């Protein structure tokens, strides 16, 4: 069962506020730093899993998808998932990684994947199930992007296993973990100006 609650009348405006823009920027930068940290650990995990079973490396991808989930769950406005994931990708690229500018293209695609899920629920449902679906959406989008930028030359078995592992990773490492991170942050009072923060207060 999705543990989201209906959005009350004061939260129904989909217009961006200044605080939304500021938080999106802060989340994006923080996410970019997480990406930078994960570029070493996650890529090592990716390579190790892929060496054991080609295609299974996708199980490490979820952390690179978490920006869109966090943006959508906290800001709850059209474009938030895309913007946070994109800023995170830009920060990661600027700091430096082995993928260079293509990181930004990945950020756009992955952010759109998460964004489409939140849009499908009309930006009104933000429970753990929707978060997991957003992670899956970002993962599927990442898989499509990588398929047409290199993996199309690989076997059907590889691409099928890669898709399955990315979906699982997206659901758990981006979606479920992202949901718990947002709930933990909301419980501190740091998100009091957002609906998720008010929901946390009502549950206390």
Image (spheres, grey):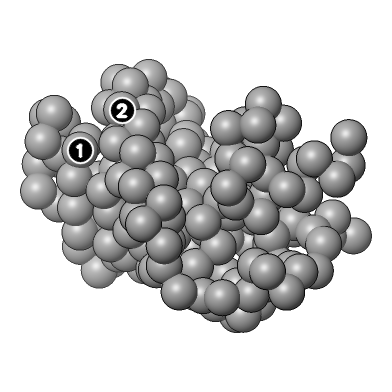
Disc 1 designates what residue?
A: 91
Residue lying at 67% horizontally and 26% vertically, measured from the top left: 188
Q: Looking at the image, is 113 positioned above or below residue 55?
A: below
**Earlier sequence position, callout 1 versus callout 2:** 2
Q: Which quadrant holds the C terminus?
A: top right
The reply to whether discs 1 and 2 touch (Cβ–Cβ < 8 Å) is yes
Evaluate whether residue 121 shows in this view.
yes
**Horizontal side, residue 102 vs residue 186: left or right:** left
Q: Position of residue 10 (x, y in %)?
A: 68, 69
Q: Nearer the viewer, residue 14 or 144?
A: 14
Q: Which quadrant holds the N terminus?
A: bottom right
Evaluate whether residue 160 shows in this view.
no
**Horizontal side, residue 133 vs residue 22: left or right:** right
SS at circle 1? helix
- Quadrant of residue 153 within the rendered picture: bottom left
Q: Nearer the viewer, residue 200 or 166?
A: 200
User: What number of labels is visible?
Assistant: 2
Q: Position of residue 27 (x, y in %)?
A: 39, 40
**Horizontal side, residue 168 vs residue 40: left or right:** right
Residue lying at 64% horizontally and 75% vertically, measured from the top left: 12
Task: Name the disc covering residue 182, or none.
Answer: none
Q: Position of residue 184 (x, y in %)?
A: 68, 30
Q: Position of residue 83 (x, y in %)?
A: 33, 58
- Inter-mark Cα distance, 1 to 2: 7 Å
Residue lying at 13% horizontally and 28% vertically, measured from the top left: 95
Label 2 Cα neighbours within 10 Å, binned few <14 / some 14-19 / many ≥20:
some
- Quadrant of residue 146 within the rendered picture: bottom left
Task: Name the disc covering residue 33, or none.
Answer: 2
């Amino acid at each position: 069962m999705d543990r989201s609650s209906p959005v009350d009348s004061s939260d129904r405006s989909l217009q961006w506020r200044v605080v939304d823009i500021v938080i999106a920027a802060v989340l994006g930068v923080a996410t970019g730093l997480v990406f930078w940290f994960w570029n070493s650990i996650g890529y090592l995990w990716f390579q190790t899993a892929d060496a054991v079973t080609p295609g299974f490396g996708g199980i490490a991808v979820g952390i690179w998808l978490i920006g869109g989930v966090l943006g959508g769950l906290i800001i709850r406005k059209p474009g938030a998932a895309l913007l946070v994931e994109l800023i995170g990708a830009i920060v990661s690229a600027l700091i430096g990684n082995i993928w260079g500018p293509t990181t930004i293209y990945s950020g756009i695609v992955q952010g759109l994947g998460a964004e489409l899920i939140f849009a499908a629920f009309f930006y009104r449902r933000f429970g753990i199930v929707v978060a997991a679906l957003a992670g899956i959406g970002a993962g599927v989008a990442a898989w499509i992007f990588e398929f047409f930028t290199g993996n199309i030359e690989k076997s059907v078995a590889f691409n099928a296993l890669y898709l399955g592992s990315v979906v699982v990773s997206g659901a758990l490492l981006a979606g479920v973990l992202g949901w718990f991170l947002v709930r933990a942050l909301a419980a501190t009072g740091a998100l009091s100006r957002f609906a998720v923060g008010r929901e946390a207060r009502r549950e206390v």
